[in-house]
Amino acid sequence: SMNNLQTEGSSNFRQENCRAKGGSPGFKVAILGAAGGVGQPLAMLMKMNPLVSVLHLYDVVNTPGVTADISHMDTGAVVRGFLGQQQLEDALTGMDLVIIPAGVPRKPGMTRDDLFNINAGIVRTLCEGISKCCPMAIVNLISNPVNSTVPIAAEVFKKAGTYDPRRLLGVTMLDVVRANTFVAEVLGLDPRDVDVPVVGGHAGVTILPLLSQVKPPCSLTQEETEYLTSRIQNGGTEVVEAKAGAGSATLSMAYAAVKFADACLRALRGDASVIQCAFVSSQVTELPFFASRVRLGRNGVEEIYPLGPLNEYERVGLEKAKKELGGSIEKGVSFVRK
Ligand code: NAI
């Protein structure tokens, strides 16, 4: 098999031992959907992450080529490729972190919910594998519609008896990355110095940037607030339309996914005060899942922060967000329960 080919002889095993002895903490990371538009640059960036000792690339097509290519990068992580359903279990066994960008992306005119019929089944299958092979792994779920795929994953894990809500995270980091960029542009700041909490979910009006809580503190006019909220909520659509049928955000998503995965790995290593926004099982609102700022630790989500003071514009936005989000969550739950 391809896996055997990648590890033929003992060179890969020797490398791995050698690195383990080096004493630096190395984590085992799998990417499911690694040959896709998000998956490929994500695989490249994870191969560059010094916290990764082993990188498993799984897809139903094209992983031999992607794996051969990435394996030539002279960084520490040992890369192995896995092709097709019959190699899913080998891809997952022993993993500390599983990142899932598998599934179809949007085309112009589509909402993220239009992807449900295809992606729901893909996520279910992959999560069944996780329950079986690495039930303790942290899961970063990217596949859309995130507002429904996270509840799907939770239901699959519950069925299998492996559900730990702390370890399941829907990736909304791209919304934060966009918000930081767009707000910095309006304020004339370096985006690296800007931090915008984005809560709610990951689709249209469920994406709720809390512009009253931007760091550094700033005051935006009502016009700027409305422009920024709309641009952040429609950032994905901006890319889908610019790509004109060739897919949705892939490069900025890979960047955001790696930023988020790196935070998860630093938390697993034991770093303190690792805080990011993510879509997680939550009691911050009456909904069972909600994106907000969370503190990450050795077990995944260790603490979920309340939304903090909202202004009138944000309170109205929150009610709209909850209404749509509730339906999307319900749709995911009933997909597995039906
Ligand atoms: P793509 O179509 O370029 O790649 C998807 C990959 O998934 C393909 O290589 C395909 O072979 C693979 N795949 C399909 N079925 C699979 C299965 N059963 N097991 C493993 N792999 C499978 O799509 P792209 O652009 O990479 O997007 C992937 C997903 O990420 C989409 O659902 C998209 O909506 C989502 N996304 C989410 C974002 C977020 O902010 N959470 C941002 C950007 C994309």
Image (cartoon, rainbow, N blue to C red):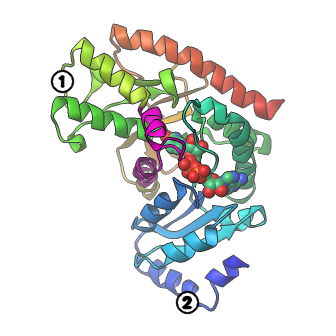
Q: Is mark 1 within 8 Å of ligand 1?
A: no
Magenta residue check for 100: no
Residue at image mark 2: 11
Q: Which of 235 and 123 lies nearest the eye of the viewer?
A: 235
Q: CA distance from mark 1 to mark 2?
A: 55 Å
Q: Is residue 293 visible?
A: no
Q: Residues within 10 Å of mark 2 (few under 14, many from 20)?
A: few
Element carrying mark 1: loop
Q: In this view, which residue lies farthest toward the front?
A: 244
Q: Nearer the viewer, residue 280 or 103?
A: 103
Residue shown at the point (36%, 22%) measured from the top left: 229
| In magenta segment, residue 250 | yes
Magenta portion: prevailing SS class: helix
Q: Residues in magenta?
A: 235-263
Find numbered disc 2 in the image and state the secondary structure of the residue it sits on: helix
The count of marks equals 2
Sequence-first tag of 1 and 2: 2
Which residue is painted at 34% across and 16% down in the image? 309
Amino acid on which the number 2 mark rests in the picture: Ser
Residue 164 locus on image (x, y percent): 64, 42
- The disc at residue 199 is none
User: Residue 162, how many percent across, how many down?
Assistant: 72, 46
In x, y percent, where is residue 56? 59, 67
**Which quarter of the rendering shows the C terminus?**
top right
Q: Compared to 307, does 313 lie above or below?
A: above
- Residue 36 placement, left or right of 89: left
Farthest-out residue, bottom: 9
**Residue under circle 1?**
218
Q: Compared with residue 213, is residue 75 higher up or lower down, i.e. above or below?
A: below
Using a 10 Å C-alpha cutoff, classify the residue at mark 1 as few (fewer than 14 neighbours), some (14 to 19) or many (20 or more).
few
Q: Nearer the viewer, residue 27 or 198?
A: 198
In the shown orientation, is residue 214 left or right of residue 308? left
